[in-house]
Amino acid sequence: MHAPKPLTATRVAATCAALDSASWPAGAIVLRTAPDEAIVLVPTKDIEPGLIADPHAIVEIESSLCGIWLDADDAHDLLERECDWETPSARPAFAQGAVAGLPVKLWFEHDRVLFVVSAVFANDFMERCR
Amino acid sequence: MSKESVLAHLWQQQGDPTRGGSVCAAGDCQSCLATIDGIAYTRMCRTPWRDGMHVEPHPHGDQLPALESRGNRAATIARTMHCDVVVIGQGSAGLAAAAEARALGRDVVTLDTGDGQDAIGIYPGPLVVARTDAGMWHLYPRIEIVVATGAAEIQPVVPGNDLRGLVTARAAESLSAAGIDLGRIVAVGTPPREVACTVAVGALVRFEASATDASRVGAVIARDDRGVEQRHVCDTVSLGLGLAPRDALLRMARGTNVHGVGDVLRAPDLPPCPTAGIVCACLGVTVDDLRSVHARGFHELELVKRATLAGTGPCQGAACVPHVRAFLAAQGAALQPPFTARPLTRQITLGEVAAGAHHVATPRTALDAEHRALGAQMERLGGWWRPWHYGDVDAEYHAVRTAVSLCDVSTLGKMQVSGPGAVALLEHLYPVPIVSLKPGRSRYVLLLDERGYVIDDGMVCRDGETRFTLTFTSGGSTFAELWIRDWAESLNADVRIMNQTTSLGAINVTGPRATKLLALAGVTTPPAFLHHDTLDVAGICCRVFRLSFTGEVSYELHHAAADSVVLWRRLMELGRDLGIRPHGLEALMKLRLEKGHVIVGQDTDFDSTPRRLNHEWAVRLEKPAFVGRHAVIRTNAIPLDRQLCGFEMDGIAPAEGATIWHRDAFAGYITSATWSPTMRRSVMLGWLHLSNGELPTIITIDGRPARRVATPFYDPEGARARA
Amino acid sequence: MNEFVERLVDLRWPSAVKPAYDVVIIGGGGHGISTAYYLATRHGITNVAVLEKSYIGSGNSGRNTTIIRANYGIPEAVRFYQRSVDLYESLEAETGRDVMHHTKGLLWIAHSEAGVRQERARAEVNTAFGARTEYVSPRQIQEICPQLDMTGQGQWPIYGASYHPAGASARHDRVVWAYAEGAMRLGVDIHQHTSVTGLQKSGDRIVGVETTAGPISAGIVLSAVGGHVTAIAAMAGVRLPIRTHQLQAFVTNRYAHTFAPIVASSGLGVYASQTAKGEMLIGAEIDRAPAYAYDAGHQFIRSCAFRSIALLPFLRDLKLLRQWTGVCDMSTDYSPVMGFTGAPGFLVTTGWGTWGFKAIPVGGEQMAALIATGRTPELIAPFSLDRFANDRTMADRGSAGTH
């Protein structure tokens, strides 16, 4: 496997309602990691004030994530070997959990899957998924 | 078996390869064990033959296989599959069950022993774990598990049952079908189908060795209907003595959606009470042994097992349990249920069971490669890989005390809390006033649990009216996040919480020239002590916190993790003429100990109250409510027994953990100790017991005199950090 | 006859449950039975019943990994377990029964500077309180256990270890049986398949038990149960700071006896030894989620096998025989809870966490002394229940280990 590449992303903590109703930049991949948190794969400057209806929202640059796209077959093979839990069948879909014993976020599209891993584990991820 | 087994292959090539005892050829007994390609305790009947395979006989008698693994072996692959139904066993009942489920449109995975697919256990999940020739399978059925494992044949327990040439009826069938000549076959009990044999009518009495080969059977004695023993000369005895269901999987899966089909559901045939012979061939337990333990008061199946070890060998009681139950029933007790079923029902190696597992990963900061390039010895500390030193601890120490140094503190727990409920939440969590903290200011805080014990420490930094940055120890941040989220939830606090521990890098710039270095990096008005600000440092946007752990002027630069390497390199470059060098944790431990700073986890235990830590100044009981307040008030009313104190003595530092003695009585132990290059003596922290209500002053550590002294040892007024 | 069978005890079961005993002990495991044994042998108190809901030793006494050691982290624990080490060493001579006691030596391995610090500290406090433990170098480690991969498969290098020569093991069942035989020979009644369903009270005082074999009056009731102690204590109106967790272990088939010591690693969270039968016995840390069940988990065995191979590569090709689960009653300070409860007539011996087996002799000896004299012996005074109310907990990071 190639080394996962640094992702440009923004982390947002806000009320659940504000995240539900946010109008994210067109085409942005939004990883809803928790009811009150989302990771949006766009530069932080693209998250304009007012986009999230929560004056207390925390919006921060998230520069510590790495990602790698695998085509659907390779992703399936990798997940069969390295993932104990059942991934969603809908597309697109987001899921997160242990893959290769590491915390990984998964973004499923029709023909490909984005594996997102924190840079603190990027080396381990690459070694384990070779 | 659909593929030729090692057993059939070797039997065909060189005659009976087994070591004695009746052979089932179905994986239920231990008679065909061998060491195959270096792996002992492998059943020849379950292993498909491959050319070049190395088969060694299983050791005889008291001999045991060597404790070893030989050569390289490709790691076993594990695959996880999610399906609707798992059907274990592909005999007629299993085939029918699989077909039925498929007809309902279900996604079915089948396990066929004949194809080398052995279920080894059913675990909570439910999870079916199977060993296959292609690696381990971990199967998660959504709807149900069907167990169609059939029944095992009951083995003979009579004198001579350890001879070779004894086969079960089904083994006689499968071996004959494989073209193996078993010679003159005499059948006892149910005869084999489609195998030419003579039938010995009546009950099995014993086997007799052949005159020409004492290890092989030469005749079988059966008692006929009239009670007369008849001797039947033979080369092979076929034994059809009844069936016991292979229901261990079914029994261990209780509570999950599992059901059996076919023979696995049959009631076990109970053999006659054995009177002589080997009951458990795995451990060499005889009927005499059963009698002996029964006479000594061992009447329960479980106690008999534990007393004789019958049933604790490789076949896990499959061969002996029917006979032990029959024996105990004949002694007048009610028929007892078989052993509790537990994994594993078929044996696999540790390498196989470990397939797909990983170590708990230790995270690396963004500067990891930088440290390694600088020659750092990296260590797992506080749950991270951290530089222990860069080759010269003394130089690192002196760089901090006399010049300027960098330390990677990215591992610190870092969290933001924002919202109208932030002040109230933090007031509840921390034992010091939060409302009075002004924006731009920071405060050292302890985190207490409900029992009033210190669970972590860190800083609270106020960024705005409703917004805070919190820091925690490296090892404590995961727990701290759960702690804070739990409290926010239970107090229904209107807050947003973001854990930025791995998102942000942090570099500590420390030393008397730290301010100068920041000036070179473009910071003209650095924050004052215990203040913070957002500033451009060498072109990188940083939140700069002015605090100190080393005792010197220090700036903690928090920044986006992706900028860590650039920031580090620029600072190293800018600081070259200032005598900059990075310091690792070993030097940091010295520096902080000179300042008497406590490390939660090293200097504290899990019952450390603020009073015991001599940190009562960090707890403001006049605050009406905070977590741990009641407990602190309660324990403060109890006489103090011990306190964390500072000590100093001449000469080298004792080992951390060294005991402290006062007038020949144990008085505590050292939690941190180091030789202080600046103080020219050893300085220590440790637990000291009160003696007659007072903390002793003169004590003995490591057999040497030592003194209890106030901390900090170094720069007690803190002038250097505030400079 | 099988040698294993030949040297076995002779258990003479009582015929019927008497209506009253001086002492009723709930729980026929190691602690309950050894307490009865020491009451009879040391104090002449023989009108004692031990009530066991299943067969003797059926709970954690028969599910542990049979390790005996005294290398704990606080003085009170070191002294206490050292007494047990000594009693175990003389148990065969005292009872005349073979409990398969073997002194093996125990290596506790450090894989980091922090681990080295911890093992050196262990050696310090052990040595000061009579349990011999020394810090050993990698070269000495290799001499003691040549099978160790000193690089930890390149990931867990071995920096050093503490070595505790008194580390030993004994056959768990046989320890229970030796005590049971000795106790019954002197007139103690051990009733199997007798469950306690309630406690009899007279005012505040506990004066007996209700059982499936009828009511029994008792001068003293001692709970020596494992797993459900909070339920029994609740019947007496006593709340215990105990949670119950699972602890799993597994054994391989039998192999030639060439693995001498007991080896433990906190970094990897595993420990291994070879049993007298020749099995490699491997265990790990407790499950963090509280549970009473005896279910065996797959995640545990998969991970534990993986980690143990990193330490002892030869394990890779060994065949796994069986896995099982015990339950551990953990107090909030990871130390046992022994003695008076505040409910007159009702005593407990509990909180045996992962250290119950190794304390069977000393636990029984001391509880018997407490019952016989009505006073708490000095050796177990630190472990009394009131320590939690009195802010005198026995925080012992060393005991929070796994075995």
Image (tube, grey):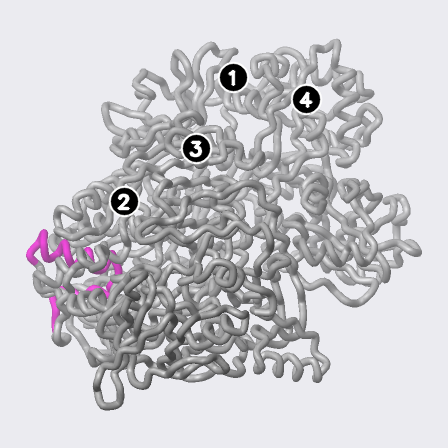
Are the residues under badges 3 and 4 in a single subunit? no
Q: Which residues are magenta?
A: C20-44
Label 3 marks which chain's residue?
C
Q: Nearer the viewer, mark 3 or mark 1?
A: 3
Residue position marked by numbered label 1 in the rendering: B714
Report the Cα–Cα distance between label 3 and label 4. 28 Å
> Mark 4 touching mark 1, by CB under 8 A?
no
Q: Amino acid at mark 1?
A: Tyr
Mark 1: secondary structure:
loop
User: Residue A42: image x %, image y %?
Assistant: 87, 48
Mark 2: secondary structure:
helix
Q: Is residue A51 magenta?
A: no
Report the Cα–Cα distance between label 2 and label 3. 23 Å
Report the Cα–Cα distance between label 2 and label 1. 37 Å
Residue position marked by numbered label 2 in the rendering: C382
Q: Nearer the viewer, mark 4 or mark 1?
A: 4
Label 1 marks which chain's residue?
B
Residue position marked by numbered label 3 in the rendering: C118
Are the residues under badges 4 and 1 in a single subunit? yes
Which label sits on residue B221?
none
Q: Amino acid at mark 4?
A: Leu
Are the residues under badges 4 and 2 in a single subunit? no
Q: Amino acid at mark 3?
A: Gln
